[in-house]
Amino acid sequence: MVRFISGIILFIFMLAVFFRTEGTNIAVIFNISSAALIFFYIVIGVMASNWKFADLKRAITASLNNGQSDLKCVEIFTFLEKMVIFASIFGVLSGAVIILSFIGAGGERLGRALTITIMPAVHGVILYTFAYILKSRVKANLMM
């Protein structure tokens, strides 16, 4: 678990260095509206499936603590990977609708709409990467 948390910290540090080098703020990547859009889409997907949040919690703690893993953990992370892909597509399409609605009103809010369009894909890549890492850890525990 320490390695996973240190990996997250190192990832955020890398993002901060990258954005600082480019002369912008790291807060650009933490767009609340697009992150909320992805989060709620994934929550709705989990609620609509036969998974319970207790199963998700058990899978995450088992993969982080090298605990008791099983094939259900692998299935949960595979499901999360797929949900993240669909959430990213949904977020990009929602952002495209927002862009189209702002084009007629002038261009002053077009930058914000572009951010809402692009950031769900970025958040999706980050979440997909973490789900893939956790699934790989569970598979490695099962192979032992």
Image (cartoon, helix red, strand yellow):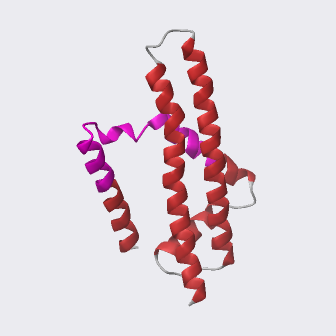
Q: Is residue 45 visible?
A: yes
Question: 111 or 41: which is nearer to us?
Answer: 111
Residue 101 in the image: x percent, y percent?
Answer: 60, 16
Q: How many marks?
A: 0
Q: Is residue 43 visible?
A: no
| Residue 53 in the figure: left or right of residue 61 | right
The residue at the point 27 percent across, 40 percent down is: 22
Can you say which quadrant of the picture contains the N terminus? bottom left
Q: Is residue 21 above or below residue 71?
A: above
The residue at the point 53 percent across, 69 percent down is: 134
The residue at the point 54 percent across, 44 percent down is: 121
Q: Quadrant of residue 38?
A: top right
Span highlighted in magenta in the image: 13-42
Is residue 21 rendered magenta in the image?
A: yes
Question: 45 or 16: which is nearer to us?
Answer: 16
- The residue most toward the front is 22
Is residue 91 rendered magenta in the image?
A: no
Q: Is residue 71 above or below residue 110?
A: below
Q: Is residue 103 above or below residue 118?
A: above
The residue at the point 50 percent across, 61 percent down is: 130
Residue 139 in the image: x percent, y percent?
Answer: 59, 79
Q: Is residue 137 above or below residue 39?
A: below
Residue 117 in the image: x percent, y percent?
Answer: 54, 33
Residue 24 in the image: x percent, y percent?
Answer: 28, 36
